[in-house]
């Protein structure tokens, strides 16, 4: 009887998993529909909009052009990475992993039926299409698998981590390949001033069917970014806007965030109203009462902040609500639905509750998603291991290693990044740079091979195998040819 009961329970659980897989597409459609019906609204800090002391600024009548402060760019792109911060970041990331595993064990009865690995088979020449189909068809139980394995169709490489990093790196490039083009089609766009990634606004003249596919693709982009967070994929070649990161983490937006993002908008549209008597002075400058109407931008004309807003006067009593609605419209009115879809996809892989419990900050998340782009040659060489040691290397082998660094010093930044990608699978380093690369970057000189062979990479252990080349120039030629390859093999 006990065996029969166990078999019945096993069969019931298996049927439940099959139902989950069959309902995946419908679930995604439902989530996209919800995002359209309930678009994103910014959550503000409880003190947002409360009056402050200070001098007033004049409110201009011209449309606002978004400007981004150097402080905002430095905070987002070049954070200070002290040893204590890196240790804390690792702890917060580890908390996310532990919480995901606990949730998996709590929500599914028969763990033996759940996949330990999310396995994706991808054709290199159809990378975006295959990847999106795989993420579209994957049920939540598969997305919660503790490990990830990529298999490139027609290639012999076995994923020990390198192929996954290459997949994150390459697909991330696809998501932003024309991000700086106002008329581009990439899912993520980059502000010309901010140099930061946000969901691309949908074109005003797009068809309804196109809008539907766009929302679905944005949801899948959220899943992809969350997988990058979990599996240390560093998928984005440029930082995601810290404000988008705050939305993902469910963190409230503070007044200083608006000031750092766009100091011109804050100085002209918000700061004057925070001063004592600011509302009266602004209305005097305008020559008319202030109403619940948004600030016009280059992309969108002024519009009512709420129904009947054009005839609703701003008073001292409703001023905090006006400022919240004004900033909400300025920050996300053009991409509300896109943000909501991105969040829903991200939370499919890492729930909002897990993110909040982890203690991750917006800067943490941005850094984990894009890694470190700067390549410090001194740090690179300092944290490189050479297979063997000085005593075991011959003079010829030592010379080859010296030539490698000589060649690296002659390459430009992009070529050096290609070498890192060749060796590790990703052109971006983990937070902390080469010092935090695990396993460390390694060079090996394979004396048994002919000097006509190309250098070979072992991405799972971050290693480049060099032959005993006859000169630095020959090593350079062979290395540049190797880093241009995009396939993986076992040789």
Image: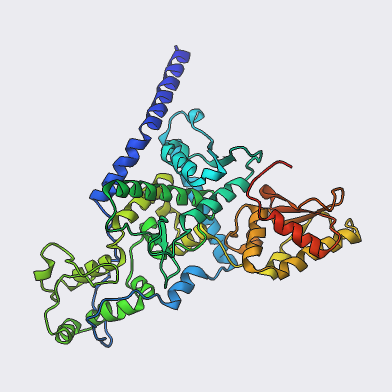
- The residue sitting at the top extreme is 1
Position of residue 118 measured from the top left corner of the image (x, y, whole percent): 52, 38
Position of residue 351 measured from the top left corner of the image (x, y, whole percent): 40, 47
Q: Quadrant of the C terminus?
A: top right
**Placement of 131 over or under 464, stated as above or below:** above
Instruction: State the residue at coordinates (51%, 44%).
Output: 126
Decide if residue 397 is on the left or right side of residue 112. right
Q: Nearer the viewer, residue 129 or 101?
A: 129
- The residue sitting at the left extreme is 311
Q: Quadrant of the N terminus?
A: top left
**Placement of 446 over or under 286, stated as above or below:** above
**Can you see residue 186?**
yes
Tag count: 0
Decide if residue 379 is on the left or right side of residue 135. right
Q: Locate residue 332: give its quadrant.
A: bottom left
**Can you see residue 382?**
no
Position of residue 333 measured from the top left corner of the image (x, y, whole percent): 27, 62
**Placement of 416 over or under 426, stated as above or below:** below
Q: Locate residue 107: give its quadrant.
A: top left
């Amino acid at each position: 009887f006990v065996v029969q009961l166990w078999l019945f329970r096993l069969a019931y659980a298996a049927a439940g998993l099959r139902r989950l897989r069959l309902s995946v597409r419908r679930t995604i459609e439902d989530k996209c529909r919800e995002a359209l019906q309930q678009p994103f609204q910014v959550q503000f800090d409880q003190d947002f909009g409360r009056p402050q002391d200070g001098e007033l600024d004049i409110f201009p009548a011209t449309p606002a052009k978004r400007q981004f402060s150097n402080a905002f760019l430095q905070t987002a792109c070049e954070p200070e990475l002290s040893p204590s911060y890196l240790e804390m970041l690792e702890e917060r990331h580890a908390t996310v992993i532990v919480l995901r595993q606990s949730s998996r064990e709590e929500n599914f009865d028969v763990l033996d039926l759940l996949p330990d690995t999310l396995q994706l088979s991808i054709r290199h020449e159809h990378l975006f299409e295959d990847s999106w189909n795989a993420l579209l068809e994957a049920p939540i139980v598969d997305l919660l698998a503790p490990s990830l394995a990529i298999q490139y169709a027609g290639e012999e490489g076995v994923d020990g981590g390198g192929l996954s990093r290459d997949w994150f790196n390459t697909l991330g490039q696809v998501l932003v390949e024309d991000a700086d083009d106002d008329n581009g089609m990439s899912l993520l766009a980059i502000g010309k001033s901010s140099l930061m990634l946000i969901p691309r606004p949908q074109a005003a003249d797009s068809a309804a069917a196109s809008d539907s596919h766009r929302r679905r693709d944005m949801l899948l982009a959220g899943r992809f970014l969350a997988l990058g967070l979990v599996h240390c994929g560093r998928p984005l070649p440029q930082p995601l806007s810290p404000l988008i990161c705050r939305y993902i983490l469910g963190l409230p937006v503070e007044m200083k965030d608006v000031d750092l993002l766009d100091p011109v908008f804050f100085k002209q549209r918000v700061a004057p109203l925070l001063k004592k008597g600011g509302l009266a002075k602004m209305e005097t400058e305008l020559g008319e009462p202030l109403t619940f109407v948004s600030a016009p931008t280059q992309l969108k004309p002024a519009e009512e902040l709420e129904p009947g807003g054009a005839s609703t006067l701003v008073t001292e009593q409703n001023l905090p609500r006006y400022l919240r609605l004004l900033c909400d419209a300025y920050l996300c009115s053009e991409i509300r639905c896109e943000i909501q879809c991105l969040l829903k996809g991200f939370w499919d892989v890492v729930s909002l509750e897990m993110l909040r419990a982890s203690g991750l900050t917006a800067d943490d998340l941005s850094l984990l998603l894009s890694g470190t782009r700067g390549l410090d040659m001194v740090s690179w060489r300092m944290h490189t291991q050479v297979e063997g040691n000085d005593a075991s290397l011959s003079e010829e082998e030592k010379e080859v290693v010296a030539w490698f660094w000589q060649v690296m010093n002659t390459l430009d930044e992009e070529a050096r990044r290609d070498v890192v990608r060749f060796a590790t699978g990703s052109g971006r380093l983990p937070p902390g740079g080469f010092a935090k690369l695990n396993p460390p970057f390694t060079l090996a000189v394979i004396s048994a091979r002919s000097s006509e062979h190309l250098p070979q990479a072992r991405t799972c252990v971050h290693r480049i195998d060099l032959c005993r080349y006859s000169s630095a120039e020959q090593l350079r030629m062979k290395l540049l040819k190797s880093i241009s390859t995009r396939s993986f093999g076992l040789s």
